[in-house]
Amino acid sequence: MEITQSTDGPQDVLDPALGRAPYPVLVVDATGSVARLNGAARSLLGMIPGGMPTDRAPGWLAEAHRALAAAPAPVRAGAAPSLPEPAAHGSIGDRFFAAHAVPDGDPAGTVWWLFDVTENRRLERELAAERERTSFLADASGQLLTSLNLERCMEVTVRLAARHLADAALVIAPGSGRSHPVSYCGPDGEVRHQELLVDPADVPGLAEAMQGFPPVPSRWIDPAAAPSWVAREDLGELTAMVVTALPGHGVPAGALVLLRRGGGCAFSDGEETVARLFAARAGAAMSAARVYAEQASITDTLMRELLPPRTMRLPEAELAARYRPSGDGELVGGDFYDLHPAAGGPGAAPESLVVLGDVCGKGLEAAVLTGKIRNTLRALVPLAGDHQRVLELLNGTLLNSGSTRFVTLVLASLRQEGGRVRLRLTSAGHGAPLIVRAGGEVESADTRGSLIGVLEEITSTTATVLLEPGDTCLLYTDGITEAVGGPLGDEMFGDERLRAELRGCGGMPPEALVERVHMLAAEWVGAGRHDDMAVIAITAPRRHHLSAVGGQGPGRFTA
C-alpha cells in the first residue's frame, strides 16, 4: 500500500489497486481538486492531494477535465468494462501521453489514467511515412511505365521529383559529345526540355552518375559551387543539392539532381533512401525507353529496305501493284515484288524487269529472307536477259545460306515493240501469270519451273507474250487464289473463280484491276485469316481513249 502525504497534515491513503498501477493515476473529486494520486503521477506531475489540476497539470489535461465535468451527466454515468478511448492527448516534458477518463465511485469524480505513448507515436509516424513513401513509389512506377518515349519519361521523373522530393529537379540524359538532353522542373511545376552543351565533370559526382552501371552512391554538392545551368536563378538561395545516378539495365540512363531552396531543411537519411529507390525506377523506365527508341530506329531503317517499291513507273508499260501482309498490324511479309527499269547507255539491259515472289512462311522471318532475295536479284539485274541463269544463281545463293525456306517467283522482262509490249515470262514454282485481253478473254501464260532453294538443279520454261494496247498481264501470289472464305467460310477462292471475275475486267486500267482483285479476295475472306497477298498488273499503253460505252476497246478519238 502506498501512502501520500499532504503538506498541511492529514494522510490520505491511496486505493491499493491504484497504488500498484505502473501508470500515473490521479483522482479528481466533484469539487475539481485532486483527491488522490499514485507515486507515478506525483513523480510525473509534481502534484500532491488537495491541489487543483490547473496548478501543476499540463493545460491540455486540465482543459480535458473541465470539458468532461461540463458534459451532461448521462454521458458520464455508468462504469465501463474497459478503458474508453483517450479523452485527450498531449505532451509532458519530452514525452507524449494519452489520458483516459473513468468515472469514480462518486458519480461526480473522475479517475485519470495517463499512458506514455511516445514510442507508439514514433512508430505511427514511421509507419505513416513508410506508407506515404510506398504510395509515392507505386504511383511513380505506374506513371513512369505508361510511356516508352524518353522525353516523356524524363518529364515524369523531374515533375515527380520536384513535387515529392525537393523544390526543383533536373534530369541529365546521355547525349552526343557534350550535348546532353536536360529536363528541368522548378517550384512552379512547369517542365522545360533543353539540349545543353555541358561538361558533367563541372558538377561533382555527375560524371560518375552518368556512367550508368554499376550505380554510385548519391553525391552531396555545395550549391555555391554548382554551375548556373544547375543552380538556376529562379530558385534563389539553395540549401541542399544532391546528385543521384539513374541506373539503367546495362544502358546509361543519366542522373537526377535534387535541389532545395533557402529555408528548407537538408535531405534526411529516409528521404535520401526514397530518392535512390525512385531513381532506380526512373532509370529503369528511361533505359527501357532509350532501348526501345534505338530498336525502333533500327527496325525503321531495316523496314524501309523491306517495303515494296513506291515508284511504279516503267517506260514500256503502265504498271500498278497492291500488297497486303497476312497480319493487320504488319507492314511486310513473305510476298514481295520489285521492278528494275531498263538502264540507259551503251551495253545497258534493253528490257525492264518485274519480279513477283512468295517466300515460304510469313511474318518477320519470311520478310528477312525476302530482303536477301531482293538484294540478290538486284545484283543479278545485268544478267536478266537470261532468266534461267538468274534463277540458277539465286538458287545457289539460297542453298548456301543455310535457310530451310524456299521461294517461288515470276520474272517478267518487258520491252516496247511499236504499240505493243513484248513480255518474257518465267515461272519458278509459281502460278502462271494470266493475260487479260482488252476484249475480256483470259489466257494463261505457258511457263513453269522448279522451286528456288530446294534442289541443286532447277529447270524453267520461258513464255513470250505480246500485249496489244489495253491488254494486261496479271502477276499474283497464292494468297489470292488460296484465300479461304465464301458463304460457309471453308472454300478457297480458286483459279477458276479468279478467271471468271477477270473476264469482266477487260480493258480496265491497271490501278483499277489490282484494286478489283484485292477487293474480291478480301470480300471472300471476310474477317477470317489469310496469307500475304500481292498483285501486279502490267498493261500495254492505249493509243486511243476508252469508248464512252462499256469502257472496252478503242474509241473514235485518238489520244
Image (cartoon, rainbow, N blue to C red):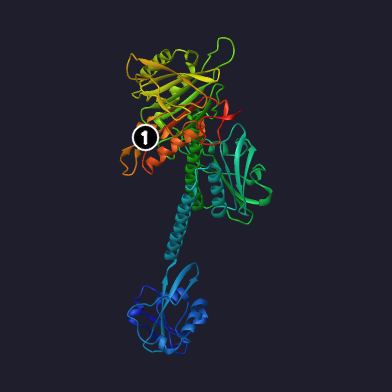
Q: Residue at x 34, y 78 (%)?
A: 82
Label 1 crowd bin: few (<14), some (14–19), many (20+), radius 10 Å: few
Question: In this view, which residue lies farthest toward the front?
Answer: 556
Q: Is residue 324 above or below residue 427?
A: below
**Left or right: 152, with 114 as reference point:** right
The spot of residue 437 in percent (x, y) is 46, 27
Q: Nearer the viewer, residue 311 or 71?
A: 311
Residue 247 is at least partly visible in this image: no
Q: Nearer the viewer, residue 401 or 1?
A: 401
**Number of marks drawn:** 1
**Left or right: 547, with 502 as reference point:** right
Q: Residue at x 60, y 42 (%)?
A: 182
Q: Nearer the viewer, residue 289 or 535?
A: 535
Q: Which residue is mark 1?
A: 497
Question: In this view, which residue lies farthest toward the top?
Answer: 347
For label 1, the SS is helix
Image quarter where the N terminus lies is bottom left
**Left or right: 225, with 407 as reference point:** right
Amino acid on which the number 1 mark rests in the picture: Arg
